[in-house]
Amino acid sequence: MIQFSLKLTLIIGLSLALQTPTVAQRERKKKPENGKLSSERLSEAESVFIEGEKFFILEDYSKALLYFLRASELNPDNPTIYYKLAEVLAKSSKDEDLKKASVNIDRAIKIDQKNKYYYLLASNIYSSLGQFSKSAQVLENMMAEVSETEEYLYDLASLYLFDKKEDEAIKVYDRAEMALGINEVSSLQKQRIYLDRGKIGEAIAEGEKLIQAYPEEERYLLALAELLAQNKQMDRAIRTIEDYIKQNPDSPSGKMLLAGLYRDSGQEQKSRDYVIDLFNDPTAAVSSKIIMLSTYNAMLAQAKRNGKEDVELSVFMLDLFRKLETNHGEDALVHAVGGDIFLTLEKEEEAKKQYLKAIRLGANNFECWQNLLFLETRSNQFDSVIVHVDQALELFPNQGIIYYFGGYAHLRKKDYRAASSLLEEAKKRSSTDESLAAEINGMLGDAYQALQEYDKSALAYEAVLATNPMNDMVLNNYSYYLSLRKADLEKAEKMSSQLIKNHPDNAAYLDTYAWVLFQRAKYKEAKKVIERAIASGNATAIHFEHYGDILFQLGDIDLAVAQWRKAKSLDNTNNNVDRKIANRKIY
């Protein structure tokens, strides 16, 4: 919605309000019988108006409106009163009030056609009503009636654009150029219109006109070169910047753009020569160098996604980063981009070091914190994750992924209460990300199981299965925990059975299924399944312990003890296995 600056002050308002009564009083002395308002009535109107203005200043608009209405009844020929009525009503967002405002401001203009503030308010009101054609017409009328109002041509052009009358907007911008000279607003707006219409030649001409008018403005020439490059005129774009750099050899922005154009046109060596020059230039902005490095990093990441390794680019990019780090090691963003580079290069330890340097220097870049937490989680540095989660939440209290990392770390540290609290916060902030929400609910199921809050655990697991019935982790954990509690074993068997149909050779899933069958006293079936798990070659101590328990129930005590001993050899911390071996029975 277009907005205008209303400069009418209380003093101006009062002087205008007083103007009509003064004339009326003089006329009344001359012609007492001519129908003019009495001096007493005009004086009362003036007093009422002043009271209304006081309440307007105090922003008590309802009282101000009442006083202005009374003033209009006492002095119906004063345009300032109608202006103030319109101004009060325009404070509302209701269409009915805005329509009343339009009626009052139209009355003010009808009485006084030379006050530009009346027109500006009228245009603003009609714009608020969505009547852009009428709003534009009001400004056209103002410029016809009031001198020195050409500055509002830009507002008029904007109204035509809102009204989708682009041809009219172009005409108005041309009028603005005639009256006020060539400037950025009109040229860039016309350029945008021409580009939207596919009139590339006209758009380029506008850019050239701007350069001719302001040859010292580097950004206009750079913008023209970019426009040429974006519209299949790369050679002309390159020539434009080459010519500019010949005249301005110390232009970092010009070098950066030319390096990019050379790269986009396949002239990689020329591009890199300019990039090296740019990184050796102490006057070049650090931000420009960081952007350049980010561009190369994106290129390398894309090559990796396509299964290609660009060793030469990796070396070149690292050399540039080391220069940047040496010269601007105190800049947090330098280390943030360094972290990104090493993450792309799969040098995770170095990436962590760079991200840590970035946050210690005050980086408030969310991706920087997120990547650090990701890397620390991957390397099982859960104490560090917990510390950095607390710090990150001070900066990003509404980011669900931060709570997720904290919840995961506490879960792995077996601090289940803290884990469940953080994961619940993560879930609240991740409802639109189904994949993340499912993972969070899966972990909540595990945490509540450990806290023996079984109803909450079941609800969390069921929430996952409602959206993804084949979620492997939840099917496994849910069925296993049910088997441990000997609860709803039929459901547990169904889930674990489905799981091994999808993963017939997964030792962990086979063990879960075997244990569910064991709890259902289906020992022969359980034996066949656990033997498949052991035959996979990925058996752990728990597999052999379960195998021994199953054999014990089948009456093969000697073989059961032998399996418990294998379990003990793989995990000598399990005291329960010691008791089974010593007493030759299960507990």
Image (spheres, rainbow, N blue to C red):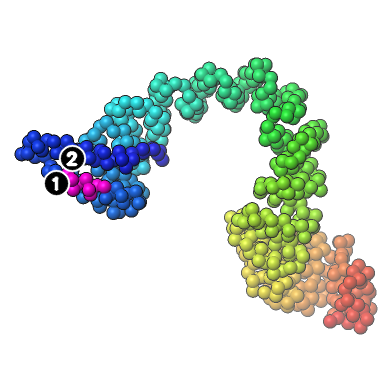
Q: CA distance from mark 2 to mark 1?
A: 10 Å
**Residue receiving disc 1:** 40
Give the residue at the far left of this rendering: 33
Residue at mark 2: 21
Vertical position of residue 352 compared to residue 522: above or below = above
Point 69% across, 51% down: residue: 370
Residue at the image position 89 percent from the left and 79 percent from the top? 580
Quick one: SS at disc 2? helix
* Residue 221 appears left or right of 580: left
Q: Is residue 201 visible?
A: no
Q: Nearer the viewer, residue 312 or 7?
A: 7
Q: Position of residue 261 (x, y in %)?
A: 67, 25
- Is residue 310 located in the magenta-colored stretch of the structure? no
The residue depicted at 81 percent of the width and 68 percent of the height is 511
Q: Nearer the viewer, residue 41 or 565?
A: 41
- Residue 92 image point, x, y percent: 34, 49
Q: How many marks?
A: 2
Labels 2 and 1 touching (C-beta < 8 A): no
Task: Report the span colored magenta.
Answer: 40-50
Q: Secondary structure at mark 1?
A: helix
Q: Which mark is residue 211?
A: none
User: What's the residue type where badge 2 is placed?
Assistant: Pro
Dominant SS in magenta: helix
Task: Name the N-terminal-most of marks 2 and 1.
Answer: 2
Quarter of the figure with residue 154:
top left
